[in-house]
Structure formats: structure tokens, C-alpha cells
Image (spheres, rainbow, N blue to C red):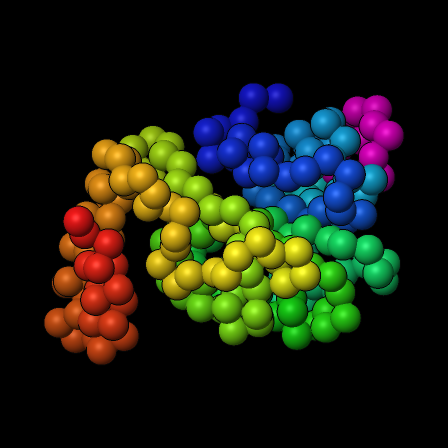
Amino acid sequence: MKLSQRLQTLADLVPRGVYAHIWDCCCDHGFLASVLIATKRAPNVHFIDIVPELIEKITLRQSMTNSAVNWTAQACDITRLRLSDSNASQLIIIAGVGGELTAQFIDAIVVNNPSKDIDFLLCPVRDVYRTRQALINYEFGLLDEQLVTENKRTYEIIYASRQHAIQALSLIGEQLWQPQNSIQLNYLARLIKHLQNAAQTSEEAKKQLALYQQLIK
């Protein structure tokens, strides 16, 4: 199955054999999780989406394949998601929704599953600053972060962990801007322009704007 550039980048970041469970939340048509199953990234992979019709289609398609990986497909409100009782490490993937909503999902998942060893692999559509705030509030650190461009739009990908992080997580990113190339500079320019407009009526936007302007060389 051929993935889009964004989903392929997410798939490439998922290590094989590290997680007991991978949860592809807001999975849409389930293409990412299907590839993770086909490449045996974890013994258990879960399709999660709030739309029952999508889950029905995924279930039908997946039931026609042979796989050594256990899988489930569940129509579920992510804010009510309860993870497996396993004490093993689990990866939550959330992509394709706004940063504010992603932050709400992080809040709910962490609060509802307080004893779980959870890592997050995230690709918000916008408002990534709010997503980063939520991760930092729950003491998540960074495993990796990247920019990926698809259909003339640039996305931030954040791979975060509490127990296995290799460095602190920044509100505006660190690895994203080193070194600065045309993709990064164009993305940064769009962020700053958006925040300049928002800063006219928002003190929060002014604070964010000051941080991003420090990146300009």
C-alpha cells in the first residue's frame, strides 16, 4: 500500500518491536495502521476513529488479509479511550486534526490512563504550539521531530516520550530549524505572518510571535 508523504514519514518513525500496542487514532481510512500491520511494527495494532462507517470499511478490508499481527478496529471517542491493561510500552498516533484538538486528546488519554507507559507520535494540522504545551505539561520529552511537506503544505511531526526521551521538548521546536533550508524558512515565514495578524487581538499570540521571531537569522 502506497502512503502519502506525510503518512510515510510517520510510518518510518515507528520502530519495529518496541511497542506492545500501537493505537492509530483518528485513523480515517486506516492506511497508516494497515502498513504498520503489514510491516509487523508491533504485535497489536488498533484502528480508532469516531466514525462508525469508516471502522466498518476498515474491518471488512482488514479481515480479507492474512496477518501475524493482532488487530482491532473500534469506533470510539478518543477522549474516552482506555488502553490495554498491559504494562508494556504503547504508542499513540494522532494525525490530521488541529493542534488544539490534539492537545485535548493528549489531556484525556494521559488522565484516563495514568499508569500506562505511553509515547505519542503526532502530526497536527495547525496550532502545533498548543500541542507542544500539552506534552510539556505532562513532562513528555523529545524522541524526534521533523517537518514534512505535502501538497504545498508543511506539517510538524513530533515523536514524544516521558520515559525514553533523549532531550527536552521545546515549545517551538529545536531540530526543526537546524540547519535552516527553504522549506523551513517558508514554513517559519507563514507562522510568523499568521501570528502577527493574531497578535493584534491576542496576548498569547504576541508571546508565541516573540519566540518564533528569535529564530530569524
Q: Is residue 118 visible?
A: yes
Of residues 11 and 25, the one drawn nearer to the viewer in this rendering: 11
Of residues 72 and 199, the one drawn nearer to the viewer in this rendering: 199
Q: Is residue 76 left or right of residue 85?
A: left
Q: Residue at the spot x=60%, y=56% of the render?
A: 165
Q: Is residue 66 left or right of residue 176?
A: right
**Does residue 75 lie above or below 62 as drawn?**
below
Quarter of the image with the N terminus is top right
Q: Is residue 41 left or right of residue 97?
A: right
**Does residue 213 lie above or below 66 as drawn?**
below
Q: Residue at the spot x=18%, y=52% of the render?
A: 216
**Residue 50 coordinates in the image, percent (x, y):** 62, 55
Residue numbers of the magenta segment: 59-70
Q: Is residue 135 left or right of residue 216?
A: right
**Does residue 12 lie above or below 107 as drawn?**
above
Q: How many marks?
A: 0
Q: Quadrant of residue 131?
A: bottom left
**Does residue 28 lie above or below 215 as drawn?**
above
**Residue 46 coordinates in the image, percent (x, y):** 73, 46
Of residues 56 and 124, the one drawn nearer to the viewer in this rendering: 124
**Residue 149 coordinates in the image, percent (x, y):** 36, 34
Q: Is residue 51 visible?
A: no
Residue most toward the bottom? 203
Indicate yes or no whether the magenta region holds residue 131.
Answer: no
Q: Residue at the spot x=75%, y=65% of the render?
A: 116
Indicate yes or no whether the magenta region holds residue 67.
Answer: yes
Q: Residue at the spot x=39%, y=63% of the render?
A: 171
